Amino acid sequence: MKKNIAYILIFLFILTLTGFGQNHISGQVIKVLQKDIIAQANWAMTQKPITITAEQCERSAGGLHDFYSEGDYWWKKPDDPNGPYIQRDGQTNPDNFVAHRKAMIRFSQIVGSLASAYIITKDEKYVKQAFLHINAWFLDKNTAMNPSLLYAQAIKGKVTGRGIGIIDTIHLMEIAQGILVMEKASVVNKEELQAIKNWFEQYLQWLTSNPYGLEERDAKNNHGTCWAMQVASFAKLTGNQTLTDYCKNRFKTVLLPNQLEKDGSFPLELKRTKPYGYSIFNLDAMTTLCQILSDSKDDLWDYKLEDGRTIKKAIEFLYSFVAKKANWTFQQDVMYWNEWPVAQPFLIFGYQHFNQKEWLDTWKSLDHFPKNDEVIRNLPIRNPLIWIQ
């Protein structure tokens, strides 16, 4: 009898190591979001592809297939409306061109919703619809986007594009992850799938060699984090182990030691005009990096610097301000102060790895489908179910 009990305990332990906990967190997410996921997916089933070729801006120096956006915090001079733009840090100019960014966000929402519904239902109609959009963005010669970002976050009268604009393609990450979730479905054309992965390989080559990419990689704040987060995501899709290892090392030797303070804060984000939103955004990016890169041999969630700093410390620091915003002791954001927080991915990812129930409870209580454009722009992970499989 004692031997049988021992075998049962060993069996349960093995289950825990090989996926029982993963199934538990999936179940929690499905319980909270299933109704909304299916509703979003049913909406997505009715949508036709809209890519960047649907709308152009006369101020773009690029062509029809080049992504274009304009720096958010740059405005016309009141006394010289036709001259070079001037900066108002933290204040978004509503007249800037954002159509390509909105099209990419819509694309991300559609694919993320369809991939999530496929996980729940196993119905391949969702996969078929998702690849209709994916093929339009990456394969169709008439509507595809070039695998580069030369004209993102341009500033009228100053620059035609900037490395800082690379942050705009964080919304391609849920496309990449959605493809990983759906790629084994029988309706997926394997030749097309390889061509799509080749697009991401070309984009990775550009991100890691073009001066804009190198400039963004070396950014000391959330931009550097988001460069690594994107490269890690696209490297995972394409099976690029060299870049995967590079991002792991960069997290350990550059991002965590140079951005995280001993108390768990991100000082470079706290110095900005929107310290609350930027701190949340950077923590979401840091934890998403851990989610993408961690494996049984190299768990970034438990990685500790020599002085004891860890990603868990960062979650603990910011959690109290997310659970109760009135606790915030720093400057308030100059814009969108009332719109944050929402159901931040760092809460659900953190719960999955550290089993802090209050983090899960807070995640459940917050808005999972925000409507504000600025919040959506700074929330690249909107479909957590596809990330915890």
Image: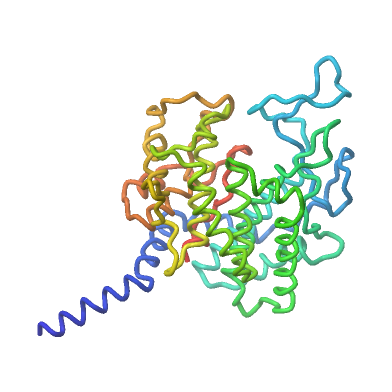
In the image, farthest residue toward the front:
306
**Looking at the image, residue 211 lies above or below residue 76:** below
Q: Quadrant of residue 230?
A: bottom right
Q: In which quarter of the image is residue 188?
A: bottom right
Q: Quadrant of residue 250?
A: bottom right
In the image, farthest residue toward the left:
1
User: Relative to the observer, which residue lies in front, 242 or 56?
Assistant: 242
Name the spot of residue 226 as percent of width and height, x first: 60, 49
The residue depicted at 74 percent of the width and 35 percent of the height is 71
Residue 91 lies left or right of residue 149; in this view the side is: left
User: Relative to the observer, which residue lies in front, 229 or 197?
Assistant: 229
Name the spot of residue 165 as percent of width and height, x first: 72, 44
Q: Do we see residue 19 in this rendering?
A: yes
Residue 84 lies left or right of residue 47; in this view the side is: right
The residue depicted at 49 percent of the width and 47 percent of the height is 256
**Which quarter of the figure is the N terminus placed in?**
bottom left
Name the spot of residue 311 as percent of width and height, x first: 42, 49
Name the spot of residue 278 as percent of width and height, x first: 55, 36
In the image, farthest residue toward the top:
79
The colour scheme applied to this rendered structure is rainbow
The residue depicted at 58 percent of the width and 40 percent of the height is 221
User: Relative to the observer, which residue lies in front, 147 or 136?
Assistant: 147
Residue 344 lies left or right of residue 374; in this view the side is: left
